[in-house]
Image: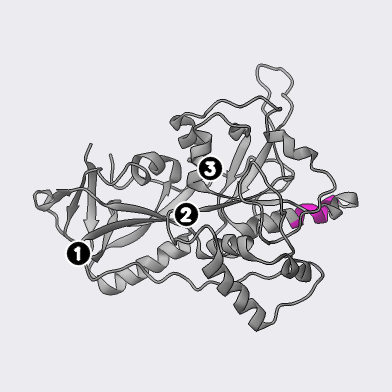
Amino acid sequence: MIRSLILLVSASMALAASPAFFARGGGASSIAARSSVFGVSRGGGLFGSKSKDDSDEAAAIADPGEKYPAMSEEEIEEWLSHIPVFAVTDSKGQGVVLRPDNDTSVFYFFMSPQMANATLQTLKGANEDMDLQISAMSLGKVWFNVLNAGDDAAVKLKAPNSADDAEAMVTKGVQYRLVPDTRDLMGARMLLTMDPADGEKLKAGGEFSAEDAQKAIQKAMTDSPKFKNTFNEIPVFMIQQMRLQKQAKAEDGNAAPEPVNLLPMYFNLQNMVSTWQQFLAQAGGDVKDVEPAINLMELHELVDLMKKESEIDFRNVLLIPAVGGDAPAQTAAAGDASGADPMAQMGGGTLGDD
């Protein structure tokens, strides 16, 4: 099937400059330096390897010798469906393809609405006569059908402000790029490169000098073994001890089933850290001394694992959308996992599809 019309922007346009990297302060320590079925858990990072009780980690892991069945593409699409991604489109929902050079056609999906808006403002500045906007779409709807459909998928391209579909050209080779928030990308790199000594210093309440901070950022930029690209490498963060509860509804007058424990995974590192700290502040007692084991995965690798038999029960894993700007976390570390649907305000089809 040939995808619906995609608007072509002049070759002189390029992607808007990404927001500057910066290191977030507060609540930082060291990372769990041990292997994990969940992904990378080494190097340095935010909290520390000490944990008083790791028993909850088994809640989403099969017993030895047992595995959970692979998830189907339909299940994965549903698993991703509540995650919004943002793209520049015209008022009809036709996506804007950028031409950084004569041989490359690129369509960008952004995890961050702020980064999408920065690109929108750059495009509007050079194309004042074009009616452009930011459109929100479901990551589940575009994951297999667009982002991972391959470069051979045929699309129709037409010049800006062209009203005649007859002028559209059918082409292949459009690159679809999913862009993470640069702050979370830097957070992932720093998790992989921060020295344990630096983490202990922060944990003890010490402060980095401007020179130390610059060295840490430079090391993250140059030495990180993963997340070196600015697109199609999406960090996903989790704390192994963290769980959410989903309360099941009673049916036909029967008593409600026991709540289901879910393992949350976050696209936004600061959101996860703030949620954990809020939980510790409310929990009190010995829980305050628990050192969370932060783990890091890449979204494409995570989806690949879900398509195979696994020790992890991905059906009881919940992805938490990033919270825009500096808004507080909306999900409690131990509470009801049924929040407002972030997809409720999304409308229209995918890239102009009927």
Q: Position of residue 177 (x, y in %)?
A: 37, 54
Which mark is first along the chain, 2 or 3? 2
The amino acid type of the residue labelled 2 equals Glu
The stretch in magenta equals 277-283
Residue 178 lies, with reference to residue 13, above or below; the image says: above
* Main secondary structure of the magenta stretch: helix
Q: Residues within 10 Å of mark 3 (few under 14, many from 20)?
A: some
Image quadrant assignment for residue 313:
top right
At x 71%, y 45%, the residue is 240
Q: CA distance from mark 3 to mark 2?
A: 11 Å
Quarter occupied by the N terminus: top left
Q: Residues within 10 Å of mark 2 (few under 14, many from 20)?
A: many
Q: Is residue 327 in view?
A: no
Q: CA distance from mark 1 to mark 3?
A: 34 Å
Q: Does dot 1 land on a helix, a strand or a loop?
A: loop
The amino acid type of the residue labelled 3 equals Leu
At x 50%, y 61%, the residue is 181
Which mark is first along the chain, 3 or 1? 1
Q: Position of residue 270 (x, y in %)?
A: 64, 60
Q: Which residue is mark 3?
A: 302
Q: Does dot 3 land on a helix, a strand or a loop?
A: helix
Q: Which residue is mark 1?
A: 102
Instruction: Look at the numbered discs 1 and 3 and tell me whether their residues touch, using CB distance below 8 Å.
Output: no
The amino acid type of the residue labelled 1 equals Asn
Q: CA distance from mark 1 to mark 2?
A: 25 Å
Q: Does dot 2 land on a helix, a strand or a loop?
A: loop
At x 85%, y 54%, the residue is 288
The label on residue 233 is: 2
